[in-house]
Image (spheres, grey):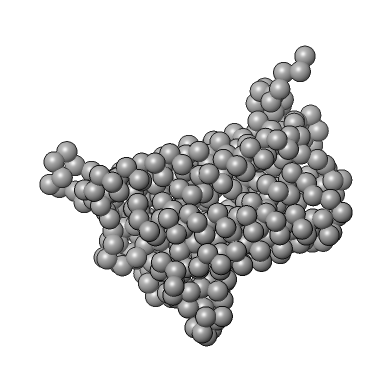
Amino acid sequence: MDTGTTAFMLCSIIGLTVMIPGLALFYGGMVSVKSSVNMMMMTYGAVAVVGLLWFVFGFSLVFGDSIGGLFGNPGDFFGSSGLFSPDGSTAQTSYSGLPILLFSLFQALFACITVALISGAAADRMKFSAWMVFAGIWAVVVYFPVAHWVFAFDGVVSEHGGWIANKLGALDFAGGTAVHINAGAGALAVAIVLGKSANFGRGTKPHSVPLTLLGAGLLWAGWYAFNGGSWLGASDGAAFAMVTSFLATCAATLAWLSVEKLKDGHVTGIGAASGAITGLVAITPACGDVTPMGAIVVGLVAGAICPLAVGLKDRFGYDDSLDVVGVHLVGGIIGTLMIGIVGSAESVQGIDGLLYGGGLDQFWRQLAAAAAVLVYSFVVSLVLALAIKSTMGIRISPEDEELGIDARLHRDPAYELA
């Protein structure tokens, strides 16, 4: 055991936990006041159900010995067996210098936050019961297998790992594919099945821009733990990931605001918050694979493209209420592909991309990984959402939507105004 590593990861886990209220506030401020509490509860509900599933069999499905490179053996660590022991004699108690049970908690929060991201596409109109069922099943059939593909390396926790990490050789430092492309594709499927909200296309405004900005700030802070903590130790690698995360976020914020000014003639608080999150999303897969200057390029590209991608929902008619597709799916794709373009062997673990003389070898690997996760997540998510729609129902009634989910389903308004 390494006490320094363990202490660093304890702090990282606290940082990841801060992302839970951060995401709740970020989403909760952007929706109508009639559904703000519901929006926040979708985050907390997802964390609760996915967290339990993770420690029962999720860790085993992700980090158990691979079955065909597709998912881990669910029996290897079922019920978290083998992850702890009073005397350390009968369990694999350490991983990279820290208690493996603590590593499991760190990865559990990744799973919880990924599922919660999807809820932004269901704002104002999805049954809470349907959401909870979707969140639990989606974690099992989509997130756990994809996380195994990307995060399970041969000979680390188990002898054999996932196909993207070991066979394809695509790079993903902290989850551009497993987290952001995965959640974004799932969100697109949910938005299609749910259909348009009653206010779609009317330009409804967020009820509290300050809450959204506060949530974005908490997410920014927690993202240092998300990316830096993925190095699993207090080292130059963690420091490097935090610095590139900061630079990409600054660059993306400025790029988003610039596009907003050129396109609409003004800059907004929602734009600043969205730009920051876009930069964090895009740098997540690349934070250990690009130089600081490369991180700025990643942020600028994502910050310029994602606000334009957000407008696709109006063109194609899918109601991605809080722009999960435009920010997380598109931003995750950009960050994943940019490794193949501006990746550098001068970074802590990178490989030279196209602009550093590496040719297209790494780019096609990144493209294949992004495409595989996108297609798998979208198809399975679509089938799952349609199954829930045809059985228990997925959308609230028009009357409940008009009155507001908070009042009809939760009896718990965001503000007591009387």
**In the foreground, 252 or 205:** 252
| 323 relative position to 242: left or right | right
Q: Quadrant location of residue 80?
A: top left
**In the foreground, 391 or 252:** 252
| 220 relative position to 83: left or right | right
Name the residue at 67% across, 54% down: 253
**In the foreground, 18 or 261:** 261
Where does residue 33 sit, x and y in percent of width and height? 75, 31
Name the residue at 43% across, 39% down: 14
Name the residue at 66% across, 23% down: 412
Q: Seen from this angle, which residue lies furthest top? A: 418
Q: Is residue 361 above or below residue 8?
A: below
| 201 relative position to 376: left or right | right
**Number of on-image labels:** 0
Residue 329: tell me if it is visible: no
Q: Seen from this angle, which residue lies furthest front? A: 293
Q: Is residue 406 above or below residue 96?
A: above
Where does residue 405 sit, x and y in percent of width and height? 71, 31
Where does residue 37 sit, x and y in percent of width and height? 65, 30
Residue 47: tell me if it is visible: yes
Say which quadrant the C terminus sits in.
Answer: top right
Name the residue at 49% across, 61% down: 287
Where does residue 229 sit, x and y in percent of width and height? 41, 51
